[in-house]
Amino acid sequence: MSDEHTVVIDNGTGYTKIGFAGEEAPRQIYRTVVESDVEGTAPVYPMQYGIINDWEAMEKVWNFGFKKYLGSSFNPSDHPVLIAETPLAPKLHREKITQAMFEGFETPGLFVANSCILSLYAAGRITGVVLDVGHATSKFVPIQEGFCLTHAVEKSNWGGQNVTLFLRKLLEQAQTQPINLDFEVINKIKEDLSFVDANYARTIETLRKQKTAAVGQQQQQQQQANGTNGTESSEQPEQQATPTSKKKSTASQSNAVEYFKNYTLPDGNIIQIGQVERLQCNEILFQPQLLHTSFKEIMPKELRPSYHTGGYQDELDELGIQQMAFDSIMKCELDIKKELTANIILSGGAATPTGFQKRVQLELENLSPSGFSVNIAPVGSAPNSKQVATWAGGAILGQLSSFNTMWIKKSEYNEFGPQIVNRRTY
Ligand SMILES: Nc1ncnc2c1ncn2[C@@H]1O[C@H](COP(=O)(O)OP(=O)(O)OP(=O)(O)O)[C@@H](O)[C@H]1O
Ligand SMILES: [Mg+2]
């Protein structure tokens, strides 16, 4: 086996994390996408819901990462690769990764790891339940002594991208003029400003009142500035919620300032984002039915992916992440349930917002039988530690000397072909 540093890749649907084993952080987190050279041609996303479905594009994404982020002298044929794969992926998926790495990149060694087991390692544990809320998927994975309890894994095609799409709808609804914000721009607004509250029902009521007051105040100021005192615009306060302005905001020292947050868009325009929208967007992770009940009319098809059919569902039957986590734990043997609730690991970028961890803690405490203690183990102290948890676990595993025996070597691949990978995963 090569002495060269092992490359660690967390192959996320939205974001690829790449770097070297033994290092603290990935060298880079970049979009899992192939941008088109031809203007007006759509970018290609090689993965859907954790699964690679365009292998040519995926190889381009890996190649891009190797060349651009691992140093000018980096040559993939010198470095073994440890790559994370979503739990419960089909065997053929793993075999194709194996083939691509050995034949496409001539890697000298490979290990394909369950992404959630790696997140557990990042928390320094070998037993626990991982709640990974990524960009396109959420996974709930109980693990005992390093082995995934497959029968109890829960998954859904629900994650950060749904939060972003929902935020887009909320902002459009709250806007005076039509806005046409790019997905990536809204995604960034979400990352910068969204939050989660432990008591959603109570807080959203308070914020709605603040919104009405702030919007009323803005309208009054607007009318004074215009020299009018008409009442017609106050009939639709919702429509006035997040005005945009060229280069400057009109909000003054008032409730409006506290309620709205000025946000500078990449083009220099300033948009005002209200607290209701900032809170509400993440709530669909906990209460997916919010979309179905309150927002049916604004719920586009792309917000309703069906995990079961791979298409779209007419009615939303997703469960909240707290319920899926609880269901997963309850499917495990009696003697391990308590140990699992005492060792919960939050992973995935969409688990990052302020308040998220506290909310999960409270929800699971409410669901758990008495006598169960709920404890969430940290995966690191960096602001993005949840998003890079899988990668970080891979970086720990990839540098263990005992791990040398687990790699698939090039010679073994040559002898047995891609199926060899099924003997070396756990
Ligand atoms: N501070 C933040 N607040 C809210 N969301 C965030 C934050 N940071 C990252 N995210 C979101 O996390 C998601 C990306 O997470 P992650 O990289 O874990 O997903 P992935 O691995 O690409 O997807 P998957 O695991 O579903 O295949 C994106 O939707 C991103 O906007
Ligand atoms: Mg992921």
Image: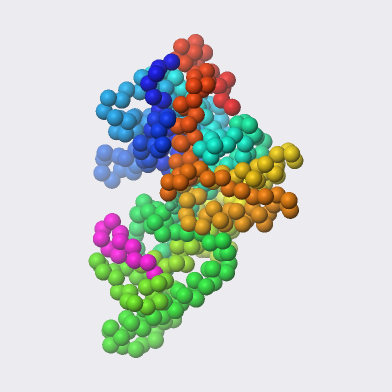
Q: Position of residue 263 (x, y in %)?
A: 33, 63
Q: Residue at x 43, y 46 (%)?
A: 382
Q: Position of residue 286 (x, y in %)?
A: 57, 56
Q: Residue at x 52, y 55 (%)?
A: 356
**Camera-side residue of 307 and 246:** 246
Q: Residue at x 30, y 86 (%)?
A: 224
* Residue 357 visible in image: yes
Q: Residue at x 39, y 56 (%)?
A: 192
Give the image's coloring scheme: rainbow
**Does residue 335 lie above or below 248 as drawn?**
above
Write down the quadrant of residue 77 in the picture: top left
Q: Which residues are magenta?
A: 260-271
Side of 364 relative to 421 (left or right)? right
Placement of the N terminus among the 4 image quadrants: top left
Whether the magenta-drawn stretch holds residue 370 is answered as: no
* Residue 299 visible in image: no
